[in-house]
Image (cartoon, helix red, strand yellow):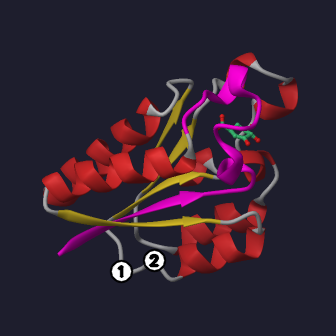
Amino acid sequence: MKRLLLLNGPNINLLGKREENIYGSFTLADIEMELKKIANENGFELDTFQSNHEGDLVDKIQQANSKYNGIIFNPAAYTHTSIALRDAILAIDVPVIEVHISNIHSREAFRHQSMLAPACAGQIVGLGKMGYRLACIALMEQAKQ
Ligand code: DHK
């Protein structure tokens, strides 16, 4: 069975309650349910994991080899700071698509740079929760080839 991982970083557990004007009113559970449904309809399993701790995210990425066909990853604030997450992505053979709910390029200057994007297969920003769906579809297409 082909398998995807939906990985979310710090404060994504607060979706629906945090800065709704930027992140919308949907919750992490909404996203997880939607992606599981899309994955299952296409014959994939989808696991989910959210953590506020950088090391836990590194561990999860390290364990992804030979377990997952792709990772949908919103690293949240660690996007802009984490060399450890970038190195973890570079260390595995699994394609990772970086997703941001908001358009990081139209926000504060410190959000414009992603430490992780150069290590990722692709990046989707600014499309709200649709970005997760598009990343999921792209990884399933790639895994079928
Ligand atoms: C989420 C966060 O928590 C921020 O730290 C990032 C990202 C943007 C998002 O748009 O999903 O800068």
- Residue at the image point whose x is 61% and y is 27% from the top: 24
Element type at mark 1: loop
Given the image, on which type of amino acid does mark 2 rest?
Ala
Q: Position of residue 132 (x, y in %)?
A: 44, 41
> Which disc, if any, is residue 67?
1
Residue 8 in the magenta stretch? The answer is: yes
Whether 103 is drawn above or below 10: the answer is above
Mark 1 C-beta to ligand 1 under 8 Å: no
Given the image, on which type of amino acid does mark 1 rest?
Lys
- Does residue 116 appear left or right of residue 2 in this picture? right
The quarter of the displayed image where residue 47 is located:
bottom left
Q: Closer to the camera, 132 or 96?
A: 132
Mark 2 in CB contact with mark 1 (< 8 angstroms) = yes
Q: Which quarter shows the C terminus? A: bottom left
What is the span of residues highlighted in magenta in the rendered image? 1-26
Q: Position of residue 65 (x, y in %)?
A: 42, 79
Q: Closer to the camera, 106 or 102?
A: 102
- Residue at the image point whose x is 79% and y is 33% from the top: 111
Count residues near mark 1 (Cα–Cα under 10 Å), then give few for <14, some for 14-19, many for 20+.
few
The quarter of the displayed image where residue 20 is located:
top right
Quarter of the rendered image showing ligand 1: top right
The quarter of the displayed image where residue 119 is located:
bottom right
Residue 50 visible in the shown view: yes
Count residues near mark 2 (Cα–Cα under 10 Å), then give few for <14, some for 14-19, many for 20+.
some
- Residue at the image point whose x is 42% and y is 31% from the top: 130
Extreme residue in the top direction: 106
- Does residue 124 appear left or right of residue 83 in this picture? left
> Which disc, if any, is residue 64?
2
Residue 121 visible in the shown view: no
- Residue at the image point whose x is 64% and y is 37% from the top: 16
